[in-house]
Amino acid sequence: QVQLVESGGGLVQAGGSLRLSCAASGSIFSLNGMGWYRQVPGKVRELVARFTYGSNTEYADSVKGRFTISRDNAKNTVNLQMNSLKLEDTAVYFCNTKVFGVVYWGQGTQVTVSS
């Protein structure tokens, strides 16, 4: 079993910054493959950023240059630094990983960007 707990969401004005954190516990052997997704009501959950093989990363085009994913292996934590936030970044952000073929999600954290 794997548990993912997100934190750091909140309300921020457009142009501002937020930092999300995801703490992983349980049968986590590696932070490879961990990432962040987001979902707006009525829309499909979409990839924001994730670690691929090794230290490689993948970002959605809409967040490239503004968001940065990082990790702390000692703390089993994956972070998402979000800068220059836009109204369209408003969503529930979910942490995600897959272990032995099983996909795990956190409970989500709300990010609201206001004008």
Image: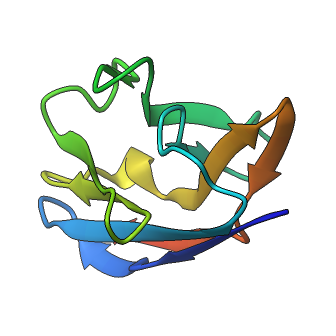
Residue 40 placement, left or right of 2? left
Q: Position of residue 77 (x, y in %)?
A: 40, 65
Residue 99 placement, left or right of 48? right
**Count of labels shown?**
0
- Is residue 11 shown above or below 86? below
Q: Quadrant of the N terminus?
A: bottom right
Which residue: 47% across, 58% down?
Answer: 90
Residue 5 placement, left or right of 104? left
Which residue: 47% across, 45% down?
Answer: 31
Residue 52 placement, left or right of 28? left
Which residue: 36% across, 72% down?
Answer: 75
Q: Is residue 113 visible?
A: yes
Q: Is residue 115 visible?
A: no
Instruction: Please tell me which residue lies in front, 88 or 78.
Output: 78
Instruction: Please tell me which residue lies in front, 9 or 29.
Output: 29
Q: Position of residue 110 (x, y in %)?
A: 55, 73
Instruction: Please tell me which residue lies in front, 94 or 113.
Output: 94
